[in-house]
Image: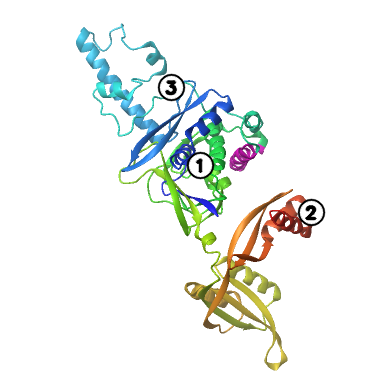
Amino acid sequence: MRIAYLECFSGMSGDMFMGALVDAGVPARVLEETVAALGVGARLEISRGLRSGISATKVDVWVEGEKDLPRNTEVRERIRHIEETALRKLRGKTEEAHGHSHEHPHSHEHPEHQQHGDLPSLPGEISRAGVPAPHEPLPHEHGHDHSHGRGLTEIRGIISAASISSSAKKTAIRIFEALGAAEAKIHDTSLESVHFHEVGAVDALVDIVCAAVGAEALGVEAIICSPLNVGGGMVNCAHGTFPVPAPATVELLKDAPVYSSGLQAELVTPTGAAIVKTLARRFGAFPEMTIEKSGYGAGSRDFPGHPNVVRLVIGETAAVASLAAKTATESITVLEANLDDLNPQVFGYVMDRLLEEGALDVFGTPVQMKKSRPGTLLTVLCKPEDAGKLTQLIFTETTTLGVRRRKEVRQTLARRWENVQTQWGEVRIKIASMNGAVTNFAPEYEDCRRIAAEHHVPLKQVMGEAVEAYRGRG
């Protein structure tokens, strides 16, 4: 299977993902034509730059001739400090040359700068004013507001009217709906009432639609994502100062593996989180694969000693080359305990807790114990390193006075997951194979149960349709 592995060791944003797509081989014209098809007065600027020594592709969104600013508060403050310092130096030089005092009524500032309170507008002007330009040129903050609110209905209309594939439209709308659902929960409102503020800006619309189109253009069957480095600190949003990661980002990344390297910056934006959560089939470590090519997408900032890039690696999974792998062999630990005085309701709870804590399998077997008392043999299969904590849980949650432990070897078939589409939503199918041939497959129970409950349809009907959808693939 041809896959893409997305490495988010420096977080994830829409522009970083676009840069990685282009760097990995998606033609720039595909994204440029997508932006033109949206008809929102935007264009892309694609360049190359270094991030801590790694060469990467940088994609910037220009709207009505203006470059979108990084939303990070620290960057905005840095821009403001540089411009204010430059303004003071320029005023000092002007007064010295013309003999004017600081309070002279005749100003030599450009009217546009007077209006917006920003001087100067270009890194070159900053440098000439005696202020060292930053490592990365920083854009000028214009008075035009790209963060006006857009409702989901308006966004759906823009996407639906664009000349892109129907599948890319559906993906882009799903990303926005995921984003909207997170915002609605955080702000205690309905999905249709959400106005997206920053995420509804034209640049985010471009990010999301280009992500959908570009992911399709990669020609991969699945995107797998690494754990995400979310950063830390505080960030300014439309609703005030929020902790990093922002509340919407936290909501979007539920069930995804995340961590912070300690870098005090917003590394995963809500837009980036929505893109990852929608496009990634699963999260995990670098998969076993044969690498074909890779691409790096640059972030707006250059952190000393930390490459601010996202990496996209394309290749074939070793599972395809080794679906010839007959069976895998692994060592496991088996824990057993006899229970004859435990409330049956508690037994079900204990099973759930053991599985939550990492047990590979848990089951009970009816047994006849001493003095002819009926009982249950609790059996737990687990990784050797988890045996200690699971034994402690059994002692804590059951009435047993002893737990037996032994090591065993088990052989397993090669397994993988595929998603199928039913009329109610996606369902995962677990597929087992031996020597490259499929031996068993079954729909994921939890997916089917959730769909049955949400749509009030029989569980067996959902499971049956998922099976037929898989068989329909041939």
Q: Which residue is mark 1?
A: 272
Helix, strand or loop at disc 1?
helix
Query: x and y percent of residue 25 in the render?
Result: 46, 41
Q: In front here: 162 or 264?
A: 162
Task: Please say if the residues under marks 3 and 1 sit with CB atoms less than 8 Å apart.
Answer: no
Callout 3: 10 Å neighbours few (<14), some, many (20+)?
some
Question: Residue at left 23%, top 8%?
Answer: 100
Q: Main secondary structure of the magenta part?
A: helix
Query: Which corner quadrant holds the C terminus?
Result: bottom right
Query: x and y percent of residue 351 in the render?
Result: 63, 71
Q: Which residue is mark 3?
A: 142
Q: Is residue 62 left or right of residue 153?
A: left
Q: Earlier in the sequence, mark 3 or mark 1?
A: 3
Number of the front mark, 2 or 3: 2
Q: Give the residues in magenta.
A: 167-191
Spatial separation of the CA atoms under disc 2 and disc 3: 53 Å
Q: Which residue is mark 2?
A: 457
| Residue type indicated by callout 1 | Gly
From this viewpoint, is residue 124 visible? yes
